[in-house]
Image (cartoon, rainbow, N blue to C red):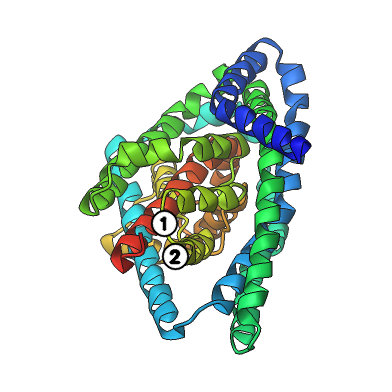
Amino acid sequence: MIETKVNSDLIQKLQKHLSLQVLLAIFLGICTGILYPVFAVKTQIIATVFVEIIKPFIAPVIFLIVVSFFAGIVDLRAAGWLSLKSLLYFELISFIAIVFGICFTFIINPGAINLTSFQLLTPEFQVAGVDSYWSNAILNLYPLIFLLLGCIIGLMINRSKYKYQIASRLDKIRNLIFEILRYIFLLAPLAAYSGIAYTVGKFGPESLVPIGKLVAGTYLTMFLFIIIVFGGILYFFKVNIINFLNDIKQELLWVLGTSSSASVLPLLMDKLEKMGYKRSVVSLVTVTGNSFNLTGTSLYIGIAVIFLSQLYQVSFSFTEILTIILIIMMTSKGATGIAGTGFIAMATTITAIHKIPVEGLAILLSVDRFMSEARAITNTIGHGVATVVMSKNEKNL
């Protein structure tokens, strides 16, 4: 009993300063990448192992949450109505994100660069390498499969007279997994350090200068989207965007370290519940949002398409722009918020458009680590905002 309390106090103390540790790790990673690039490249294994450790937890958590949710539903019609409203919201916000990204890319014009300036980056990245992403795409669909399977099993349990007992036990298992994840995330600073060190060491500050405009433009566009669009939505529901971001800042720093919004999904859900949002709404909105509400991914694909069209001097008519928006809305679904899947969705989009040379994927692949972090942070904030919208709308706060 005493030992358990000591362990609990220790983890709370470590988590209290974890945000500062992650920021310090990122700073040290940048310094290592600049000063010791050869060593920095070798540290990639740490970040890779960290994400691979977390990945197996994602599907079971989604499965348990969905089964528990549907098993304990009293009013299935009300739950169905909430699901429908959530999906409509996801589609609307995805559309706004894509249009926002396309419009701002036209304004900042990041693709107005001499194509030969990319020669330092592209030789190491062959377009054929995208095939490996396609094979991973099939594997990364497993969270969506677990989501559908959880719905079916949950509805079957709902018809049983023991449904509340089963739901209660599933919640206990979920809480146990959450506790394990909290311990694992104490290692997040190491993952953040190795991820940043590898990126800077691999490409170096000088080699990133030709595409600095794209990277800066992407982060600026996502920042403005968070402040203007998400801020406006939260303001409508009487929630301050700055206060909201401050409440989930630790989860956002974890996302920065892992480049994956799905990896911190369980802890984000736990934080939203502690903020006062009803578990049933949090569970439904965040879990379905992990596949259908990837705002950052949608926004980035819109930016990437226009960037490559500017780079290769390809013009689109208004009708073609509308077609591109529809394609992105389809290809961005099911990316699951796992690091790398955003690139898969973007590659699918470029291939479907036909007018843009596929060689451009090599350029985007070279900086996908930077873009993955921006996508993941925006996705995570999007999950939180969606929970606020649905909770306020349902008055489940």
Q: Nearer the viewer, residue 319 or 298?
A: 298
Q: Residue at x 39, y 68 (%)?
A: 86
Find numbered disc 1 in the image and state the secondary structure of the residue it sits on: loop
Q: Residue at x 37, y 52 (%)?
A: 385
Q: Eyeballing the image, is 245 above or below 32?
A: below
Farthest-out residue, front: 1
Q: Which residue is mark 1?
A: 277
Q: Eyeballing the image, is 357 above or below 158?
A: above
Q: Position of residue 92 (x, y in %)?
A: 33, 64
Residue 79 disc label:
none
For the question of whether residue 391 can be seen, the reply is yes
Answer whether labels 2 and 1 touch (C-beta < 8 Å): yes
Find numbered disc 2 in the image and state the secondary structure of the residue it sits on: helix
Q: Residues within 10 Å of mark 2 (few under 14, many from 20)?
A: many
Apparent side of residue 73 relative to residue 394 in the rendered image (left or right): right
Q: Quadrant of the N terminus?
A: top right
Q: Residue at x 48, y 42 (%)?
A: 377
Q: Residues within 10 Å of mark 1 (few under 14, many from 20)?
A: many
Q: Position of residue 52 (x, y in %)?
A: 75, 46
Q: Quadrant of the C terminus?
A: bottom left
Q: Eyeballing the image, is 195 above or below 290?
A: above
Residue 281 disc label:
2
Which amino acid, by three-letter code, is at mark 2? Val
* Marks 2 and 1, how far apart at CA: 7 Å
Q: How many marks?
A: 2
Apparent side of residue 348 relative to residue 234 in the rendered image (left or right): right
Q: Quadrant of residue 159?
A: bottom right
For the question of whether residue 111 can be seen, the reply is no
Apparent side of residue 108 relative to residue 59 in the rendered image (left or right): left
Which amino acid, by three-letter code, is at mark 1? Tyr
Q: Position of residue 218 (x, y in %)?
A: 41, 38
